[in-house]
Image: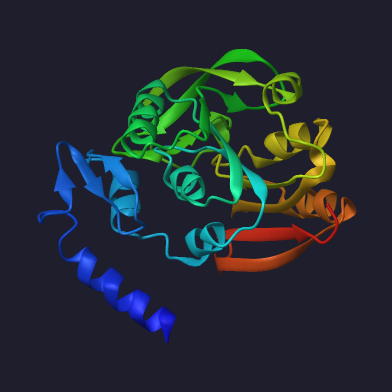
Amino acid sequence: MPRIVAKLIRSFVKRFVRYGPLREAGYTLSIYGVWLSDHWEDATFRFCANASYGFFYSDWIENLGDSVFIDIGANQGLYSLIAAKNPRISKVYAFEPQPEVFERLCKNISRNAAHRIQAFPFAVSDSAAERQMRVKEGHSGVATLRDESMSGEDFGHSVKIITVNKDFLNSEINVPEGTKIAIKIDTEGHEAEVLAELMRSGWWSQVFNIYYEVDERYIDHARILKALTDSGFSVAYRNGRKPHYDLMLQRSAA
């Protein structure tokens, strides 16, 4: 019954999100329940505002127990903001390397008074460097560090970004011993490099849940999955069909 009621409420709210009273001073109250700085020309913003990603992961975050949440590829901060509303999540670390999107992320953090979020204007990779990230016009969530030859997407422009590796993760992410860590990764084909650095971090043993986007056209997912299963993870949930889907892995003892 609660799920039916929630679905009805979300359906009602959706009618008013774009044009009704749930817009205020340049912000829109997303159906997910967080305020987002208006950017209707961006497809990623529209997906966040209209709850196009579904509710499996947002509901999971809302019910997460005592933990720290790390959001790699946070974009405008949807999942970081949802995590910050959960009082049992003591700290949220959000990584978003695109300068314009990072600015919007910071505005959203301020508008939601999400003081437990610490935002970093960096991408996680296998080295600390300046790099070029290609971004699809009108869709800030489709931004990648993968090689041009691996693309298959029509990218309109590039932006200069900064990448950080395990050294930054170890120095800037402070997780008390015994605290569990949940991680979301959305890096458009850069997942292998991100996971490799996470595995080299000093707090990797505390990670108990990973939710990430898979596109088998651009990554060797069998290799990634083997590395995670060798580290004690098993598949808990899959959303979507091959070659493009989301995957949640969980480790029973972290």
View extreme (top): residue? 130
Residue 196: give x, y in percent of width and height.
Answer: 77, 36
Residue 251: give x, y in percent of width and height.
Answer: 80, 58
View extreme (bottom): residue? 1
Position of residue 19 relative to residue 174, above or below, is below
Q: Is residue 124 visible?
A: yes
Residue 63: give x, y in percent of width and height.
Answer: 56, 62
Q: State left or right for residue 71 relative to residue 26.
A: right
Q: Nearer the viewer, residue 72 or 138?
A: 72
Q: Nearer the viewer, residue 6 or 78?
A: 6
Taking the spot 30% from the left edge, 42% from the top edge, the residue there is 36
View extreme (right): residue? 230
Q: Is residue 244 visible?
A: no
Taking the spot 28% from the left edge, 50% from the top edge, the residue there is 46
Taking the spot 50% from the left edge, 64% from the top edge, the residue there is 59
User: Residue 54 appears in which quarter of the rendering?
Assistant: bottom left
Taking the spot 49% from the left edge, 38% from the top edge, the residue there is 74
Q: State left or right for residue 105 relative to residue 175.
A: left
User: Residue 53 appears in which quarter of the rendering?
Assistant: bottom left
Position of residue 39 relative to residue 7, above or below, is above
Check the picture and name the quadrant holding the N terminus: bottom left
Residue 154: give x, y in percent of width and height.
Answer: 38, 38
Position of residue 228 relative to residue 252, above or below, is above
User: Residue 237 appears in which quarter of the rendering?
Assistant: bottom right
Q: How many marks?
A: 0
How is colour applied across the structure in the image? rainbow
